[in-house]
Image (cartoon, rainbow, N blue to C red):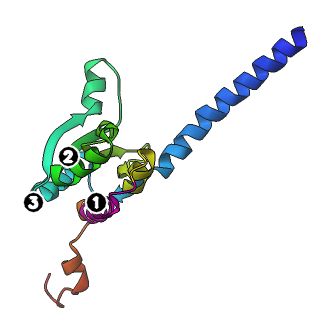
Amino acid sequence: MRSSIVFSTMICLSLALTALFAGPSLAADELVIKQSNYSVTETLDRLTKILKSKGITIFARVDHAAGAKKVGMELRATQVLIFGNPKMGTPLMLADQRIGLALPLKALAYEDKDKKVWLSYRKADDLKQAYNISARDKVFGKMKGALGKLTDKAVAKTAKKAMSKPAPRGSN
């Protein structure tokens, strides 16, 4: 009897540890993660400017490191930008209102232990799958393309036009 209790406890502990350590790797599969050439603040400043230029609404910006500081804790630079476009979001919510838990969209910029800055957001394909929305492929396609291009621009060191033309000799 006692051995079956010990065995059951070990099984439960093993499952809990597996879930604990498998969770983050599964979550990473749901995210697009890009290294930024800028600080956390500058990365989200750039993304904000780019999104606004495209008519996308900025709803909020959350500074998690500032929040941690208020309670006497330290956290490396970590900020979330919350943004959206009702032209894209509303058709998805008409298909399944529960997607409102994931909308408006969010982008997370954070600094890792090696002082590298990353910009991440949830994959449009993951949202489609998580809420089982099949009748809005065109909207998800536009979302995926726009997020990819706009976030690439936010983290890039130089504009693509500048990269395509070499600087003339002696221009320094």
Of callouts 2 and 3, the N-terminal one: 3
- Looking at the image, is 90 positioned above or below residue 71? below
Dividing the picture into quarters, in which one does residue 9 lie? top right
The Cα–Cα distance between marks 3 and 1, rounded to whole angstroms, is 20 Å
Q: Which residue is mark 3?
A: 53
Q: Inspect the magenta stretch and tell me whether residue 145 lies in it.
A: yes
* Residue 132 at x, y percent in the picture: 43, 48
* Residue 59 at x, y percent in the picture: 15, 40
**Residue 118 vs residue 69: left or right?**
right
Dividing the picture into quarters, in which one does residue 78 lie? top left
Q: Which residue is mark 1?
A: 139
Q: Secondary structure at mark 3?
A: helix
Q: Nearer the viewer, mark 3 or mark 1?
A: 1
- Residue at 28% across, 38% down: 100
Which disc, if any, is residue 172?
Answer: none
**Residue 89 vs residue 130: left or right?**
left
Dividing the picture into quarters, in which one does residue 101 lie? top left
Magenta stretch: dominant SS?
helix
Q: Which residue is mark 2?
A: 83
**Stretch of the chain drawn in magenta:** 134-152
